[in-house]
Amino acid sequence: MKLLQTLGSAFDRVVSVTNPVKAVQRAQARRVFAVYEAAAPSKQRKVRKANQSPNTLVGSSAAALRAQARFLERNHDLSRGAIRTLVNNVVGPNGIGVEPQPRRMDGTIHKEYAAALREARRDWQRCPEVTRRHSDAQMQRLLAKTWLRDGEAFAQMLTGTVPGLDHGTRVPFSLEMFEPDMVPLDYDDPDKFIRQGMEFNNWGRCRAYWVYKSDPREQLAWLNSSASLKRISSDNVLHIAQMDRIGQARGVSEFASVITRGEDLKEYEESERIAAKVAASMTAYVKRLAATETGYTGEGLEKDEDGHVKPRELQMEPGMIIDDLVAGEEIGMINSNRPNPNLIGWRAGQLRAFAAGIGTSYSSLSRDYNGTYSAQRQELVEQWVNYAVLSDDFSSAIVQPAYDQFVIAAHLSGVVRMPADLKPGTENDCLFVGQSMPWINPMHEATAWEKLVQAGFASEVEVIRKRGANPNDVLEQISTFRTTAKEKDLVFSSNAATRQTTVSVSAVPTVQQQETADNAQGVNDNTNNQ
């Protein structure tokens, strides 16, 4: 190979001296062979030459994609189900929990301060936003739905005294949610470093958002000018966006790559339903042969003024006999072969592709739970990583900065003061409790966790966290319950301290087992006597 390369280089030098034009053609041909096959144009492959910047693509497409995604959510059951599945697994029924973990100077958890923060936040979770229409879990789900459907979501943090606002909680801190339409995509001012409604510094860090003072979709278009915008510092704005590329400022809908498939599914299913309804109508027709074939001119049939035969209505009944046909007529039936037997398999394949594109599991999207335990668990394990990533994104962009501001507001308002023995910088340390992966077979899962805990490969706290509960709350519940049970002289097998005095139900033999044991004992007694 090296010898051939050496000979080729020498030959190229000779050609370049004797025939420079031919040498140039040889060099161009060599560059053609040096590209990726996928980048080479051909009749069978379309070449995508467009390579716009991320902000250019988002500026021209985000609003249209947002509108189509909202249309599918309103009118397509599968799209609505996909969003609901994502939100339920990312945020869940109780929202992403926050467990305060402040530290003392010696590094241990400051239990008293953590308990005070936990109690104040429990009060704040009742009405954390300005409209007082949503609890903390409802607010999180609404923000997550907006983020996944529209590509981004916003919330303004309001702390302390705000004109006309009653926080409604002990800690004067509230959130104001608003949709991405409130931050105009077409508002650019290069002199102020404003791009798509966001103001940046020289390093590309957002320092402010330009937001409409009222919803631009509910007022006249001529009012939607720069004068109707207000500037909000980025320190007071929570912004979560679906980012696909580095340097992207605004988010793009999670439905961007599956909108076409979703619309095709919707239209095809509607066509199949209509075809099935037509087939179920048992449509019939009367076929009349030409007079040249039968010699019949239509005598005896009722005709209109123009001499045309009037249409007749045949009342179809089970077992009826049609005996009023004239010569040259016959009955025909329209058979559309519906429902289509191939629809289920084709639809399942499309749903798998739709689920893969939007990031949810096929079983949850299609409600098809056929399969073995191993197959279902493998799907759940692989899919749960995607839910965990989305949950981490949501926690980082929404839950964590909101909690940081809540701790500051609680301190400044005097509701929960930072103690003197608190280690600086740890006042907002916390543990985010997301959704836990559900158990497919509770007996198998519980046995596996029990074995891991007994072997020392896992802790009881980890098991409780995986189940979506708070270890401190669980311990308090168990302690209170067992104290009350002891006062009432009640003994349960779940208490290991009293397990020796209890008899397991499985240990009590059935009547058949007892008879078998008695018979076996009788045989042994007879053998010993002999």
Image (cartoon, helix red, strand yellow):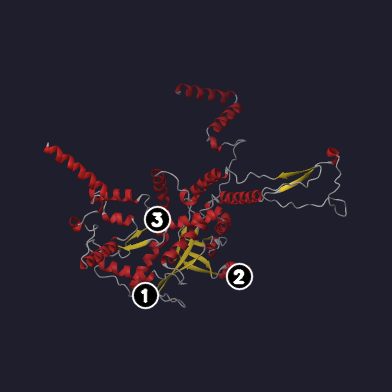
Q: CA distance from mark 3 to mark 2?
A: 37 Å
Q: Nearer the viewer, residue 293 or 118?
A: 293
Work out whether 135 lies above or below 494: below
| Res 392 label | 3
Tell me which numbered mark, 3 or 2, is placed earlier along the sequence: 2
Q: CA distance from mark 3 to mark 1?
A: 29 Å
| Res 219 label | 2
Q: Secondary structure at mark 3?
A: helix
Mark 3 nearby-residue class (10 Å; few <14, some 14–19, many ≥20): some
Circles 3, 2 touching at the beta carbon (< 8 Å): no
Q: Quarter-wise, where is residue 530 in the image? A: top left
Q: Is 321 left, or right, of 71 in this rendering? A: right
Q: Secondary structure at mark 1?
A: loop
Work out whether 134 lies above or below 506: below
Q: Which residue is mark 1?
A: 170
Work out whether 47 lies above or below 124: above
Q: Quarter-wise, where is residue 75 in the image? A: bottom right
Tell me what residue is drawn at x 16 percent, y 40 percent.
524
| Res 153 label | none
Tell me what residue is drawn at x 18 percent, y 43 percent.
521
